[in-house]
């Protein structure tokens, strides 16, 4: 169907697609932990961003509910930042040669 340079380009695209799928699968198996309050609250997310565990030091529960909520939210935000950095590192090698516009999230997540 395709010949010459176009055939080679299609083969490279297929290979890149397979590599990206493998990288995404590996990423989904990893976990990140965010924390706040010097470790008083910890939140663990998997590579897809699903929350797997929340740990709250019992001493924190004696505080105002709003403070506990802020600590949990901060730990979630910390974990999300770590997850995004992990995704960027993981996918960066695959997308390095592509001329993607600034701010373009690849693979479309």
Image (cartoon, rainbow, N blue to C red):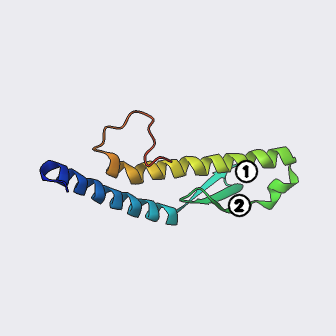
84 and 9: which is toward the camera: 9
Quick check: 5 left or right of 14?
left
Rendered location of residue 52, percent (x, y): 65, 64
Image quadrant for the N terminus? bottom left
Look at the numbered disc 1 and give the secondary structure of its residue.
Answer: helix
Q: Examine the rendered structure and indicate whether residue 44 appears above or below residue 95.
A: below
Q: Are marks 1 and 2 in contact (CB under 8 Å)?
A: yes
The quadrant in which residue 23 appears is: bottom left
SS type, badge 2 = strand
Residue pointed to by mark 1: 72
> What distance separates the C-alpha of mark 1 from that of mark 2?
8 Å
Q: Residues within 10 Å of mark 1 (few under 14, many from 20)?
A: many
Residue drawn at x 83%, y 44% is 66
The residue most toward the top is 102
Relative to 74, say whether 55 is above or below.
Answer: below
Expressed as whole percent of the image width and height from the top left, the position of residue 63 reads 86, 49
Q: How far from the left and from the top, in percent, is residue 28? A: 51, 62
Circle 2 Cα neighbour tier, 10 Å, few/some/many (<14 / 14–19 / ≥20) = some
In front here: 71 or 105? 105
Residue 54 circle label: 2
Residue drawn at (87%, 54%) of the image: 62
């Amino acid at each position: 169907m395709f010949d010459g340079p176009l055939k080679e380009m299609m083969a490279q695209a297929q290979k890149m697609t397979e590599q990206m799928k493998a990288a995404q699968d590996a990423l989904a198996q990893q976990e990140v932990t965010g924390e706040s309050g010097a470790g008083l609250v910890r939140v663990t997310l998997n590579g897809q961003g699903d929350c797997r565990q929340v740990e709250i030091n019992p001493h924190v529960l004696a505080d105002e509910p709003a403070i506990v909520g802020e600590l949990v939210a901060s730990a979630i935000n910390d974990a999300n930042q770590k997850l995004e950095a992990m995704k960027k590192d993981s996918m960066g090698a695959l997308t390095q040669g592509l001329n993607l516009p600034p701010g373009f999230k690849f693979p479309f997540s």
